[in-house]
C-alpha cells in the first residue's frame, strides 16, 4: 500500500453524491497495490496515527494527530500505482482490482477509526473534486509491503 499524507488546515471532497470536509488534520491519498495485505494496513495505520507532524509550542514537529484533535479525509487513489516506465500513457496493472481494493481501503479507514479519529472519505471509484489547504506544506509518503515499511 502507498499512502500520501498531507497535513492540512482543511480539506474537502465532493462529487455530487458526497460532500465531506475536515478541518485541521490529514488528507490521505490511499493506493492499494495488487500485493497489498491487511498486514500493510496495520503497519501504515500505526505509522500514520503516531506520526509527529504537528508543531509543539517550540515549533518542533513533536505532536501527533490525536494530540491536536485532528481529523482525516481519506481518498482512494489507484493512480499511485501508475507504471510510467514505457510510453506516455500510464499503466495501472500494479493496482489491485477494484472490488478487493475497496475492501482493503474500507478496512484501512475502519482501522483508523479504531483510534477514535474522525475519518471522512471520498467515494471509491468515482471522479471527485478534492480541495486541500496544505499546512506547511507537510507531505509524507508511506509505503508498506508484506507488513513492513519500504
Image (cartoon, grey):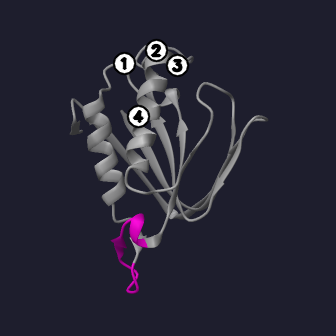
Task: Identify the mark nearer the N-term, 2 or 4.
Answer: 2
Residue at the spot of label 1:
34
**Would residue 20 be counted in the magenta stretch?**
no
User: Marks 2 and 1: in contact by CB < 8 Å?
Assistant: yes
Question: Could you tell which of marks 1 and 3 lies nearer the N-terminus?
Answer: 1
Q: Which residues are magenta?
A: 56-67
First-in-chain label (2 vs 3): 3
Residue assigned mark 2: 97
Mark 1, other Cα within 10 Å: few <14 / some 14–19 / many ≥20: some
Separation of marks 2 and 4 at Cα, in angstroms: 16 Å
Image quarter (top left, top right, bottom left or bottom right) of the C terminus:
top left
Secondary element under disc 4, as helix, strand or loop, is: helix
Q: Is residue 66 magenta?
A: yes
Kind of element beneath mark 3: loop
Pick whichever, 114 or 88, lies toward us.
Answer: 114
Residue under label 4, please give it.
107
Reading the chain from its start, which is encountered first: label 1 or label 2? 1
Residue at mark 3 to residue at mark 4: CA–CA distance: 27 Å
Say the numbered circle drawn on residue 90. Answer: 3
**Distance between the alpha carbons at the discs numbered 4 and 1:** 16 Å
> Is residue 137 left or right of 122 when viewed as pictured?
left
Which residue is nearer to you in this view: 28 or 72? 72
Pointer 4 local density, CA inside 10 Å: few below 14, some 14–19, many at least 20 = some
Q: Position of residue 15 (x, y in %)?
A: 74, 36
Binning the other alpha carbons within 10 Å of mark 2 as few (below 14), some (14 to 19) or many (20 upward) gives some
Q: Residue at the spot x=53%, y=32% of the render?
A: 77
Residue 4: horizontal and vertical position, in percent? Answer: 45, 45
Q: Earlier in the sequence, mark 4 or mark 1?
A: 1
Q: Earlier in the sequence, mark 3 or mark 4?
A: 3
Amino acid at each position: 500500500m502507498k499512502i500520501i499524507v498531507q497535513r492540512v488546515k482543511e480539506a474537502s471532497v465532493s462529487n455530487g453524491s458526497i460532500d465531506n470536509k475536515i478541518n485541521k488534520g490529514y488528507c490521505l491519498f490511499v493506493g492499494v497495490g495488487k500485493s497489498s495485505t491487511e498486514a500493510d494496513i496495520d503497519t501504515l495505520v500505526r505509522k500514520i496515527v503516531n506520526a509527529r507532524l504537528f508543531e509543539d509550542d517550540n515549533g518542533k514537529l513533536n505532536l501527533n494527530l490525536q494530540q491536536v484533535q485532528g481529523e482525516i479525509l481519506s481518498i482512494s487513489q489507484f493512480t499511485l500505482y501508475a507504471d510510467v516506465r514505457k510510453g506516455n500513457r500510464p499503466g495501472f496493472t500494479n493496482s489491485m482490482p477494484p472490488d478487493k481494493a475497496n475492501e482493503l481501503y474500507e478496512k484501512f479507514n475502519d482501522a483508523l477509526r479504531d483510534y477514535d479519529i474522525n475519518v471522512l472519505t471520498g467515494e471509491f471509484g468515482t471522479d471527485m473534486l478534492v480541495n486541500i489547504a496544505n499546512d506547511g506544506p507537510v507531505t509524507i509518503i508511506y509505503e508498506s509491503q508484506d507488513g513492513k515499511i519500504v
